[in-house]
Amino acid sequence: MENFTFSLEKGMQNLSSTGGFLTVKNTENTVNTMTISWGFVGFMWTKPHFITVVRPQRYTKDVLDVSADSFTISIPFDGKLKEELSICGTKSGRDIAKNEIVTFIDAKTVASPIIQGCDLYYECKINLTQQLEGSLMPPFVRQFYEKDFHYLYFGEIVECYS
């Protein structure tokens, strides 16, 4: 993996400020991407992981539920792909063809594609899925949820490159 420390710092900075794409392809060859603006990188089970979160009503969750074993994170830097991020963050793949908004290209090692034109890519193999329900302190539940608790997807980072 190319300079993981640089990728971690620059990736998280751009993810939180301008967003990135979570992309998944399942065993039925359905592909979808959605905009994310937060996630977590760290080490679990002695391996680097990206943890992404998806609400249960999102189309991406439906795609993940059909035997998806991977996801990718594609992060553009410096405000690139701003319009695409906006559309993919406000329009569902149930309603529009995301491949008309962004260009999917094959990832190096996982089935889920990456988004062309980004500056940093994480390719991740899913090791664990866990719903937040019952895990959050009451003030967070009252402020952020109405019984639609996020699902966390723990993806081992098998490739990280720019």
Image (cartoon, rainbow, N blue to C red):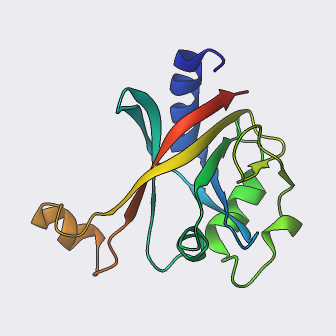
Q: In this rendering, would 6 be left or right of 102?
A: left
Q: Is residue 94 above or below residue 157?
A: below
Q: In this rendering, would 58 be left or right of 107?
A: left
State the residue lying farthest toward the left.
138
State the residue lying farthest toward the bottom.
95
Q: In this rendering, would 20 be left or right of 95?
A: left
Residue 127 pos. (x, y %): 44, 49
Residue 47 pos. (x, y %): 43, 29
Q: In this rendering, would 54 be left or right of 18?
A: left
Q: Is residue 13 above or below residue 40?
A: above
Q: Quadrant of the N terminus?
A: top right
Q: Residue at x 29, y 68 (%)?
A: 144
Q: Quadrant of residue 143?
A: bottom left
Q: Nearer the viewer, residue 32 or 20?
A: 32
Q: Residue at x 45, y 37 (%)?
A: 49
Q: Quadrant of the C terminus?
A: top right
Residue 66 pos. (x, y %): 59, 73
Q: Quadrant of residue 63?
A: bottom right
Q: Is residue 129 above or below residue 16?
A: below
Q: Residue at x 66, y 41 (%)?
A: 75
Q: How many marks?
A: 0
Residue 58 pos. (x, y %): 53, 75
